[in-house]
C-alpha cells in the first residue's frame, strides 16, 4: 500500500518508487480534513488515507455488487458526524406531520 504523508498542506501519496501524487488543498478543505482527523483521534495522514480508500471503494463498487465489508464502510462514512444530530422521537414521524396542509 502506498504511503500517505502531509507536508505544509500538501498531501503526498507515494509507494516504493512506483507512484507519487501531490494534492494541493485549499485552506478550508485542509482545515476540514484536520478537524475530521482530530474528531476521529487519528493522525492527519491516516484520516486522509481512510477518506481516499472509502471514496475509491465506493467509486469502484457503486455499479457492481457490494461486499459486506464495503457496504459497512459505505454506511459508516454516511453516518459519520450524525452523532451531533438531534434525537427525534418516533412520535415526530406521523402521517399528519408530513401532510400538515392536508388535515
Image (tube, rainbow, N blue to C red):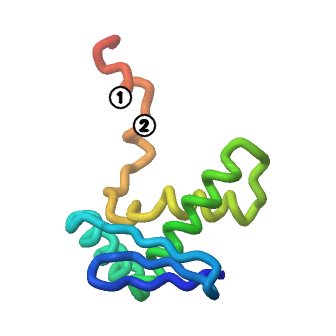
Q: Say left or right for 7 vs 31.
A: right
Q: Are marks 1 and 2 in contact (CB under 8 Å)?
A: yes
Helix, strand or loop for disc 2: loop
Give the farthest residue toward the left. Answer: 27
Q: Is residue 84 above or below residue 58?
A: below
x 40%, y 49%: residue: 89
Helix, strand or loop for disc 1: helix
x 76%, y 61%: residue: 68
> What is the crowding at mark 2: few (fewer than 14 residues within 10 Å), some, or many (at least 20)?
few
* Real-space CA distance between mark 1 and mark 2, rounded to the nearest whole angstrom: 6 Å
The spot of residue 31 in percent (x, y) is: 24, 72
The spot of residue 93 in percent (x, y) is: 42, 37
> What is the crowding at mark 1: few (fewer than 14 residues within 10 Å), some, or many (at least 20)?
few
Question: Which of the numbered marks, if any, corresponds to residue 97?
Answer: 1
Find residue 86 and report its image quarter: bottom left
x 37%, y 40%: residue: 92
Q: Quadrant of the N terminus?
A: bottom right
Find residue 34 and report its image quarter: bottom left
The spot of residue 41 in percent (x, y) is: 40, 86
The spot of residue 46 in percent (x, y) is: 48, 82
Q: Is residue 26 above or below residue 35?
A: above
Find residue 5 and report its image quarter: bottom left
Residue under pointer 2: 93
Please name whichever residue, 87 or 69, is drawn nearer the observer in this view of the structure. 69
**Count of labels shown?**
2
Please name whichever residue, 22 or 49, is drawn nearer the observer in this view of the structure. 22
Amino acid at each position: 500500500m502506498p504511503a500517505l504523508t502531509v507536508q505544509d498542506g500538501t498531501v503526498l501519496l507515494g509507494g516504493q518508487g512506483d507512484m507519487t501524487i501531490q494534492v494541493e488543498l485549499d485552506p478550508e478543505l485542509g482545515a476540514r480534513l484536520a478537524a475530521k482527523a482530530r474528531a476521529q483521534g487519528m493522525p492527519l495522514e491516516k484520516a486522509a488515507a481512510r477518506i481516499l480508500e472509502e471514496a475509491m471503494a465506493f467509486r469502484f463498487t457503486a455499479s457492481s455488487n457490494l461486499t459486506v465489508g464495503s457496504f459497512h464502510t459505505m454506511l459508516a462514512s454516511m453516518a459519520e458526524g450524525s452523532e451531533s444530530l438531534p434525537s427525534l422521537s418516533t412520535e415526530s414521524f406521523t402521517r399528519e406531520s408530513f401532510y400538515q396542509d392536508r388535515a
